[in-house]
């Protein structure tokens, strides 16, 4: 079972998490901290950067060549 929740941390250095009932009898659980919860504007800004990145553009070109029907 996987439970995903987003927590607002307000620049604190600790996060207390209440373990769901289904997990309380488990001996181990995996906690992943992921800061990829971004605004749409942040994602668009990253896409604009990628659109001029030479390595990214070469990867796209390589994929395009792999799937061309010529």
Image: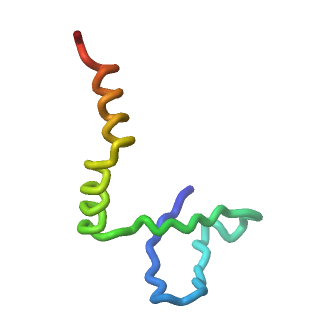
Name above or below for residue 2 compared with residue 70. Answer: below
Q: Indicate left or right for 41 with 7 as reference.
A: left
Which quarter of the rendering shows the C terminus? top left
Residue located at (58% from left, 83% from top): 15
Residue located at (30% from left, 21% from top): 65
Q: Indicate left or right for 68 with 23 as reference.
A: left
Outermost residue on the front side: it is 54
Q: Indicate left or right for 55 with 9 as reference.
A: left
Name above or below for residue 49 compared with residue 21. Answer: above
| Colour pattern of the rendering | rainbow
**Pick the front one: 58 or 26:** 58
Q: Looking at the image, how many numbered discs can be counted on the residues?
A: 0
**Pick the front one: 19 or 25:** 19
Residue 17: % across, % down: 58, 80
Q: Indicate left or right for 62 with 12 as reference.
A: left
Residue located at (58% from left, 64% from top): 32
Locate residue 38: give its quadrant. Answer: bottom left
Residue 4: % across, % down: 48, 65
């Amino acid at each position: 079972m996987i439970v995903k929740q987003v927590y607002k941390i307000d620049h604190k250095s600790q996060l207390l998490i209440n373990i769901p009932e289904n997990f309380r009898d488990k001996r181990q659980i995996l906690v992943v901290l992921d800061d990829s919860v971004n605004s749409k504007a942040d994602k668009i800004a990253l896409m604009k950067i990628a659109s001029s990145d030479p390595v990214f553009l070469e990867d796209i070109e390589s994929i395009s060549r792999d799937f061309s029907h010529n």
